[in-house]
Image (cartoon, rainbow, N blue to C red):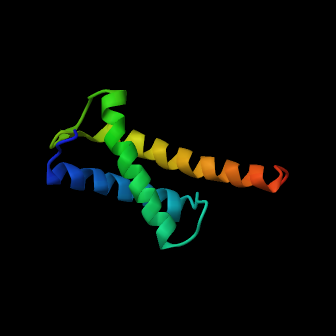
C-alpha cells in the first residue's frame, strides 16, 4: 500500500476521523484537550489503519485496496495505545500516585 491511490488515502482518512471522533468526543479518552489533540489522533489513526492490514491480514471488505475491518482495528489500536502511552508517561513523571 505504499503507492496507494487518492481514494485509498481518503478511505483511510475517513476511518481515522471516525475513530478519532469516537475516542475524543464520545468516549472522551484523551491526554490533551482541543482541536490539536483531535488532529493528532486522526494522524495516529491513519498510520494505524495503514499499517494494520499487512500485519493483521487481508480479510472481509476491500475498498480500493483498503481492507476496512483490519484498518479500523489498527486505527483503534493505534489511537488507544498512543493515549495510553502518554497518560502512563505523565503519571510516571508525577510520581505515579495520581489518577
Q: 85 left or right of 48?
A: right
In the rendered image, the quadrant that contains the C terminus is bottom right
Q: Residue at x 55, y 44 (%)?
A: 81
- Looking at the image, residue 36 lies above or below residue 97: below
Q: Residue at x 80, y 56 (%)?
A: 94
Q: Give the image location of residue 74, x and y in percent.
A: 40, 40
Q: Residue at x 51, y 62 (%)?
A: 24
> In front: 25, or 31?
31
> In front: 43, or 61?
43
> In front: 22, or 52?
52
> In front: 22, or 75?
75
Q: Residue at x 59, y 65 (%)?
A: 32
Q: 75 left or right of 54?
A: right
Image quadrant assignment for residue 20? bottom left
Q: Give the image location of residue 87, x and y in percent.
A: 66, 53
Q: Give the image location of residue 75, x and y in percent.
A: 41, 46
Q: 33 left or right of 98?
A: left
Q: Give the image location of residue 22, x and y in percent.
A: 47, 58
Circle count: 0
Image quadrant assignment for residue 69? top left
In the rendered image, the quadrant that contains the N terminus is top left
- Looking at the image, residue 49 lies above or below residue 28: above
Outermost residue to the bottom: 34
Amino acid at each position: 500500500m505504499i503507492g496507494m491511490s487518492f481514494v485509498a488515502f481518503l478511505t483511510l482518512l475517513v476511518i481515522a476521523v471516525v475513530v478519532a471522533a469516537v475516542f475524543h468526543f464520545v468516549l472522551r479518552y484523551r491526554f490533551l484537550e482541543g482541536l490539536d489533540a483531535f488532529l493528532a489522533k486522526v494522524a495516529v489513526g491513519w498510520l494505524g489503519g495503514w499499517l494494520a492490514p499487512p500485519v493483521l491480514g487481508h480479510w472481509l471488505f476491500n475498498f480500493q485496496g483498503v481492507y476496512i475491518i483490519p484498518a479500523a482495528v489498527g486505527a483503534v489500536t493505534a489511537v488507544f495505545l498512543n493515549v495510553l502511552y502518554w497518560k502512563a508517561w505523565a503519571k510516571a513523571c508525577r510520581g505515579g500516585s495520581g489518577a
